[in-house]
Image: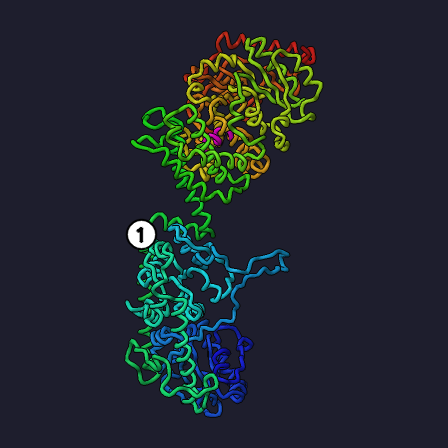
Amino acid sequence: MAYVTSRLGLKFTQMRPGFLGDLGMRQGRANDIINDGFVQVVCASADIIIISDTLPDARPLLQSLLRTDPNERCKSNIVIELTNRFDWGVFDFDEYHKLIWELVQAKPKNLFWVANNAFEAKVMADDCNANPEFRILRPSGFSDVPERVNNTKKNFVTNSCFRQEVSDAEKSTALMRELDSSEVLGHVLNAQVPFSRVVGHYGGPHTLKKYKAYIEFPYQVSTMKLYENLAAGVPMLIPTPRFFQELVEKRIHAFGPWEMLRRMGPDWFQYMDYYIADFKPYIHYFDSFEQLNEILQDPNFDAKAQTRTAAPAMYQKIVSQMLNGWSELFEEMGYKVLVDGKPRAIGSGVSVQKFVVDVKYQQPTDAQGWEQVYEKIKTWKTAQRTEQLEIWDKNEKSLNAIELKIKDAAKKGSVEKYLKEKKMDETTLIQVRALDFLNGEFGKTSGLFGGTLKNVHDIDITVELSKLLDKYNASSKNLLFKASDFNKFGYLARYLHIFDAALQKSKSDVTLASQISSVQSRLELATKTLSLALYPWLPNHDIGNLASSFRGRGIVLTFPTSGYSRGVHLILTIRNILKCNLPIEIFYIGDKDLSLEKRQKLANLPNVKTINILDKFPKVEEVHGFNIKPFVILASSFSQVVFLDDDVTLLQSPDKFIKESVLFKKYGTMYFLDRSFSHGNSEWVKSFITLPSLVAENSRYMTEVSRDEQESSMVVLDKGRLPIIHALLSACHMNLKDSRDNALHVHTHGDKESFWIAHEMVRAPYNFIPGIGGAAGFFRTKDGVQEPEVVCGPQSHIDETGRLIHFNGLVVKSKDDFSHGYLDFHHFVAPILENPGNVDIGYSPWCVHSRLPKKEIFEMSWEEKETLRQIIELHKELRDTDFEF
């Protein structure tokens, strides 16, 4: 109103009635204010009082007009300018609505009704059966918010600089202002609509008009922003009435006035300024999110409407009509008012100068009759609300999958996060299909690891790679991620595996080389960029050179000074008892980990070498203990690696079991299953392994049968296979300090699960040796009774033929005090049934209870018992010489 009165040359004083009480002043409070004389004071100080925005704040003025004593009535001319709900914040609706009806019936000569739009008049008619004569006087559309200009200002709060100008890129972009919890935002993003989202201030309409367009999903029937944008010439994109109703009735878009608007009948949109005839030529409407996308893809979508010039010209006429309309209203009161210093043009006025809204029920003649009508109105409104609730409930049940997902994401507060993850899932499918192809599964129907190509009869790897390169390039501007964000890490690691595998396979596959020749340079660049982003600790960031440096087969150990005795016993067992002469590399983490004295002694053993892991990977100094395992496997010079914990007891020669293993020949892995301690929860892994392999899909871990999947005291890998390299690299990442502290160790125990999870991350084939972790040793005795169905001892594992291969533990009863003697080994249990909770950890050593002892418990063979006898004797000899050899 300040702008309007300045154009009319009027003195304007603003009074905020908040000091009279909170919103929703009741009838009694209003009467008290009249009785206190406040109304008389206010009315004596002004010729005209304009009640703008929230009508109930002026309830004392309104109620004074109905006083029987003329001296208590306000004598000023009162203009009710409805711009918001006429009963906003009211508690005593019945009394307040009766007041409005009584005012309309009384027709005080000093009371005038004005509205920005027809909606408020219609609501008042529907709610109160009151229909005074209204005149439409639109808002001015004036905005004094300056447009953003080409300069740089200092932000003294953050001590940083921020750009104020609208860039060229922004000028070709549509803008939308929605919170991250908005379902509408989710659907716009899902439809891949090209736009930028702004939160908070955007610079007002004069800045907004510099953008390609402004997308709005109205939250009111009219807003100051609507009028300001029209006045400034901002191209606006608004849902059609049909689409808007669909969004509201699916509760995709929150629109407070909907119940009132819907009660107005099938032509409800005529009461919503976004759809009125005067404005329609200057607003662009879309009937779906897809159509919104299509409109914005057209660089000249506003060529016909010419909104930037036509809308301001149109609105200038409306402003002129509005100013002359106010002038005309003041003339009715007896005041001669100039417009911009000039007399009002004769006959000018608003296009719809005065109107009366029809009421639903015949107008009663007295208060009692009104109360009867009012009860009918309330009954009608209740029925209308019930009908609307039924529509909402029905629509909620018919929502499709994406609508439900976005609704759930909005409730959790971030639709952008959900859609980024969804986009990753869609890309993941393309990724795993490409990897299954590169893993050699296309055209096969059995013996599959991944299985996504089982029913695919045609695939063009060049097309698939091009798709992935395009998707990668679209996201390559942001390769940053938290170390513990295994979802994004896996997403990028699969890209690297695919691009690297395609390049490496093409060196020996002429057909593939020909197929990918058109994208080879892009593959090479992406591989180099991703290697650096994912594995900054890897020297030279060159996976190809790393893989080509491996040679032969060997054994890898890592132990500190405190593990020296265990390591010596294991090495001599391998050499002297198992007769295995494979080279051995012993890794340590810096000079303080394994003392120089012990290293020098170990170097005297034939074909044994000690290596400081920091010489290989200088940037992994914060990796300690068992988390170093994947790093030492990767760092070893061997192509085929047998990694052993220092407390492992081997019963077969590594050279022999590698040669005999069918699974190792097929997958390049020998992984062993852990014991089933208890049921598990795979929710964490499933959050980033959204398309597991056939191996993982039915695993104990992913089906919640066991909280533990892998036991890693012995890990055998063939690094000569590129997928194994990528799996190892991923396992290394999972064991970095930030990764393990904030993710891996939060959800799993130690390093052990990182191996198979890493394979799943990069879709590298693997499998487990059949048979669940058991126990090797003796029968448990309770209350003097031996239990032949329960075996106690270190965790044991069998090979593919059912023979004992190793167990995770020493032959001594106590690894810290050898005086306690040695374990008695004569039986072992090899569980074949999933039996969570079958491990007795209250007994020392732990015991495993078999439910099928005839099929799961076996007496050790003579060879196995003899091997263990020799291992025990070797330990005794070393113990007696303080492990000198």
Q: Can you tell which quarter of the image residue 386 is in?
A: bottom left
Q: Is residue 571 above or below residue 351?
A: above
The magenta region covers 754-761
- Which residue is nearer to you in this view: 602 or 212? 212
Say which element carries label 1: loop
What kind of secondary structure does the magenta stretch mostly adopt? helix
Task: Please name whichever residue, 359 or 80, is drawn nearer the observer in this view of the structure.
Answer: 80
Asked whether the viewer can see residue 317, the reply is yes
Q: Position of residue 554 (x, y in %)?
A: 54, 16
Q: Is residue 802 above or below residue 416?
A: above
Q: Which residue is drawn at 58% across and 8% down?
A: 576
Q: Which of 568 and 530 is in front in this view?
A: 530
In this picture, residue 393 sits left or right of residue 424: left
Crowding around mark 1 (Cα neighbors within 10 Å: few <14, some 14 to 19, many 20+) is few
Find disc 1 in the rendering and name its residue.
398
Residue 502 location, x and y as percent? 42, 30
Which picture quadrant has residue 20?
bottom right
Residue visible at 48% across and 9% down in the picture:
861
How many badges with numbers are in the image?
A: 1
Across and down, in percent, residue 635 comes to 57, 24
Residue 840 horizontal/vertical position (percent): 52, 25
Magenta stretch holds residue 755:
yes
Disc 1 marks which amino acid?
A: Ser
The quadrant of the rendering that contains the C terminus is top right
Residue 654 vs 100, above or below: the answer is above
Closer to the camera in the image, 130 or 250: 250
